Image: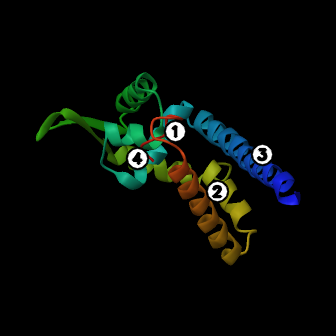
Amino acid sequence: METEQREPVRSTAMMQSFWNVQRHLVRAAHQTAQENGLSLPQFHSLMTMAPRNPITQKELAAHTHLPKSTLSQSIEGLVQSGWVIRETNPDNRREVVLTLSKQGETFITDIKQQEAGMQQQLEQVLDQIDPIVFEQMLETHAQIADGLKNILSPGNGGCADD
């Protein structure tokens, strides 16, 4: 009987914890984006592109989960700013390849090094967590994500590409 009552409390506590962290991460990302003259989708796109450079627009969409129109507008702004180069794949004319320009790579490096920026603020918080606890947390998050992925049926929830 105790287990029946405990399980919903644990799941609710976990969801509230994740939502609370997510809310603060989004606020920090929004602040960093604004301080650098970016929209939140542009910031998200750049930070997603950086470790995967170059990346197809389809792959970027799968990683960011942004609606197609939002992603297209975001990319257009980044291209116009000179931070991203957009090219058609010569081997597949339907595929658009996105590459960070040298200016874009420098811009991302600058954003990551800003003292008041999201990356540096998050690093300061994470520095206070024991490295072993941090690794356990990442493993636990992966276990939760994998478990939920296996439970959820494809097509429900909009994140089937993860």
Alpha carbons under labels 2 and 3: distance apart:
25 Å
**Which residue is located at x 30 percent, y 48 percent?**
54
Q: Amino acid at mark 1?
A: Phe
**Which callout, 1 or 2, points at the residue further toward the start of the chain?**
1
Q: Is 11 placed left or right of 155 in the picture? A: right
Kindly identify which residue carries mark 1: 43
Alpha carbons under labels 1 and 2: distance apart:
15 Å
Q: Is 29 placed left or right of 125 in the picture? A: left
Alpha carbons under labels 3 and 1: distance apart:
25 Å
Q: Nearer the viewer, mark 4 or mark 2?
A: 4
Quarter occupied by residue 33: top right
**Which residue is located at x 42 percent, y 24 percent?**
73
Q: Secondary structure at mark 4?
A: helix
Residue 49: which disc? 4
Q: Secondary structure at mark 3?
A: helix
What crowding class fits label 1: few (fewer than 14 Cα within 10 Å), some (14-19), or many (20 or more)?
A: many
Q: Amino acid at mark 3?
A: Gln
Kindly identify which residue carries mark 2: 120
Kindly identify which residue carries mark 3: 16
Q: Are marks 1 and 2 in contact (CB under 8 Å)?
A: no
**Which callout, 4 or 1, points at the residue further toward the start of the chain?**
1
Q: Amino acid at mark 4?
A: Met
